[in-house]
Image: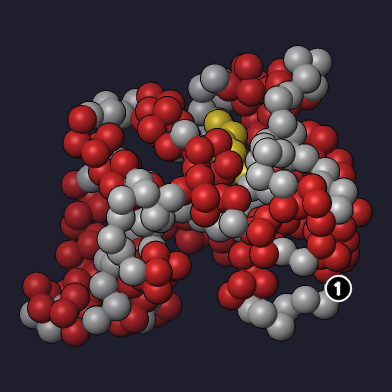
């Protein structure tokens, strides 16, 4: 599985999509373009998926940057590509494991069994990713960055500017307007549309929403499996229902200057 994932990523970064050709469906192609009506997506390709496939290969070859969002792949695995692709940069996104589990439960409401074991497995991976990103940073300075979902949600402009600088992009006025439109409280996007889109009526409230809906028992079990990650990443423990619902408790705590993560973030910034 790991080698297959690396193969797919290498295909993308080399603009050689033959490995994925048999896996691209009409629906997934349309979804990638942000259009769930796949027949509309094919109108500019003569109505043939293969024509669109060829068009994307040409666009990839002419692109100045190739950006991918890859879920659940490990930092250590992607780190193997840093030698082969000297321009590759890794942005490692972390999120409170309770929020991750809440999101999964929202998608699969029946997925409430073995919460403790699921939390242990998730946080074991999160810790490994954080340790791997720290190790990679010492070997590849300025090519690895850890970003916290909570920070991005609460300060989208500041964090996005930092990421643009990290990726050697210019952050323009148009970019700022676009980010504000995606995270601002004045959005008119319907609730149903916001659930699956990049647009959030208020990104900070979205980041905090799980604390208003997660059952305290699930939060407690997650804490039993994730205390070490909480300490490393600065996530509050939230010992009971009162803590869980208390909006005055921040999404992330200020880090101790002697902590491992504080040292790491100081190096990567």
One can see residue 120 in this view? no
Task: Determine the image quadrant of residue 132.
Answer: top right
One can see residue 151 in this view? yes
- Could you tell me which residue is drawn at 76 percent across and 57 percent down? 122
Task: Determine the image quadrant of residue 157.
Answer: top left
Within-10-Å neighbours for mark 1: few <14, some 14–19, many 20+: few
Instruction: Judge whether 54 appears above or below 161 on screen.
Output: below
Instruction: Judge whether 39 appears above or below 216 on screen.
Output: below
- Could you tell me which residue is drawn at 13 percent across and 83 percent down? 47
> Which quarter of the figure is the N terminus placed in?
bottom right
Disc 1 designates what residue? 114
Instruction: Judge whether 33 appears above or below 48 on screen.
Output: above
**Count of numbered badges drawn on the protein:** 1
Q: Where is residue 268 in the image (x, y as percent from the top left)?
A: 58, 22
* Mark 1: secondary structure: loop
Q: Which of 2 and 194 is in front in this view?
A: 194
Q: Nearer the viewer, residue 197 or 138?
A: 197
Q: In this view, does 138 lie to the left or right of 222?
A: left
Instruction: Judge whether 31 appears above or below 152 on screen.
Output: below
Q: Position of residue 52 (x, y in %)?
A: 19, 72
Q: Residue furthest right?
A: 224
Q: Where is residue 165 in the image (x, y as percent from the top left)?
A: 38, 24
Q: Is residue 40 left or right of residue 74?
A: left
- Could you tell me which residue is drawn at 19 percent across and 57 percent down? 58
Task: Determine the image quadrant of residue 81.
Answer: top right
> Which quarter of the figure is the C terminus placed in?
top right
């Amino acid at each position: 599985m790991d080698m297959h994932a690396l193969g797919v990523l290498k295909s993308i970064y080399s603009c050689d999509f033959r490995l994925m050709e048999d896996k691209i469906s009409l629906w997934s192609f349309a979804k990638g373009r942000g259009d769930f009506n796949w027949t509309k997506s094919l109108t500019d390709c003569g109505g043939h998926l293969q024509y669109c496939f060829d068009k994307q290969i040409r666009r990839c070859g002419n692109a100045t940057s190739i950006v991918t969002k890859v879920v659940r792949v490990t930092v250590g695995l992607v780190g193997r590509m840093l030698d082969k692709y000297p321009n590759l940069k890794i942005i490692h996104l972390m999120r409170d494991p309770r929020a991750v589990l809440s999101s999964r439960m929202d998608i699969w409401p029946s997925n409430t069994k073995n919460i403790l074991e699921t939390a242990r497995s998730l946080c074991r991976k999160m810790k490994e990713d954080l340790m791997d990103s720290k190790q990679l940073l010492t070997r590849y300075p300025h090519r690895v960055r850890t970003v916290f979902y909570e920070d991005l949600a609460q300060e989208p402009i500041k964090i996005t500017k930092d990421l643009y600088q990290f990726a050697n992009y210019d952050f323009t006025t148009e970019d700022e307007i676009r980010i504000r439109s995606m995270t601002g409280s004045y959005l008119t996007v319907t609730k149903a549309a916001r659930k699956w889109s990049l647009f959030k009526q208020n990104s900070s409230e979205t980041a905090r929403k799980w604390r208003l809906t997660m059952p305290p028992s699930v939060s407690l079990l997650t804490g039993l499996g994730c205390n070490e990650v909480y300490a490393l990443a600065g996530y509050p423990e939230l010992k009971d229902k009162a803590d869980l619902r208390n909006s005055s408790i921040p999404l992330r705590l200020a880090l101790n200057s002697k902590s491992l993560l504080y040292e790491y973030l100081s190096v990567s910034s």
